[in-house]
Image (spheres, rainbow, N blue to C red):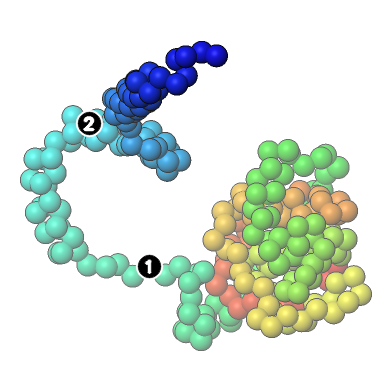
Amino acid sequence: MDPNRDNPILRFTTFWWGIGSFLIFAVVLAVILLLNRKAPQTLEDAAAKPRYEIKARVDAAQAANLPKEAIETAIPDVAAKLAASKPTAVEKPEQVVPGSPTAEKLASAPPVDTAAIDAAPATDEPPDPAVMAIGKVQFMVCAACHGQNGEGGPAAPPLAGSEWVNGPVSNLIRIQLRGLQGPIKVKGTEYNFPGGMAPMAYQTDEQIAAVLTYVRNNFGNKASAVKPEQVAALRSEVGKPQVTAAELTQP
């Protein structure tokens, strides 16, 4: 039997050596943590860092090309010109107030002869892929009511296989520029939605031509492309009341 096991002094010394070793380890660990202490970085901080760097570069470039003193010097002059300026009346057809004299004038204007537009030579050439790409993007707005696949929905009739889509070009252009009100029969079913379709005249001629070309060549439809000049020829329709099926050329 080892006599050291019953030695209380040895046991006492061993105990304190253990405590001391633990304390030394704790102190070393605390020093390491203290020296390497960094603020926690969140995903928001990581995303913000490059933005702050870009902002700093932009601010530096602006300060180099347009000093703060020059801006402050110009402010009184610009403010005086703005205060002295008077608004100019600008009448935009797409913002005509219903029932106003302008609206009545537009409503009483003779209809545009669409014969030349619909008689535009059709071609069997496939639509331009670039135009179709633009049309696909623009159709995202239409899809909210007409469905992602032109299947129609609670607020709009179907576009897939529609005789109106595959029919005369002028019909679709006029609906796009003026909106649509009242009943319309599509594929043998009559649709009459409250409020009808709102006009989309805010789009450019190119965008309208592209989205109509996209619709006329998707969802089982096959028809000629729509040209921006055909849309431009009907721009005078903008601001008129919503078109009705009776006003359109029957497909």
Work out whether residue 26 or residue 101 is closer to the camera in this orientation and state it.
26
- For the question of whether residue 109 can be seen, the reply is no
Question: x, y percentage for residue 105?
Answer: 52, 80
Q: Residue furthest bottom?
A: 99
Work out whether residue 233 or residue 204 is closer to the camera in this orientation and state it.
204
Q: Which one is closest to the eye, mark 1 or mark 2?
A: 2
Which structural element holds mark 2? helix
How far, Cα to Cα, is label 1 from label 2? 40 Å
Give the residue type at disc 2: Ala
Question: x, y percentage for residue 20?
Answer: 32, 23
Count of marks, rendered view? 2
Work out whether residue 246 or residue 115 is closer to the camera in this orientation and state it.
246
Which structural element holds mark 1? loop
Drawn side of residue 2 relative to residue 178, left or right: left
Q: Quadrant of the C terminus?
A: bottom right
- Tag on residue 90? 1
Work out whether residue 32 or residue 39 is closer to the camera in this orientation and state it.
32
Drawn side of residue 60 relative to residue 220, left or right: left
Give the residue type at disc 1: Val
Drawn side of residue 119 relative to residue 228, left or right: right
Q: Residue at x 90, y 70 (%)?
A: 187
- Tag on residue 60? 2
Q: Quadrant of the N terminus?
A: top right
Q: Residue at x 85, y 64 (%)?
A: 162
Q: Residue at x 27, y 33 (%)?
A: 56
Q: Residue furthest right?
A: 188
Q: Is residue 34 above or below residue 204?
A: above
- For the question of whether residue 203 can be seen, the reply is yes
Q: Is residue 35 above or below residue 233?
A: above
Mark 1, residues whose alpha carbon is within 10 Å: few (<14), some, or many (≥20)? few
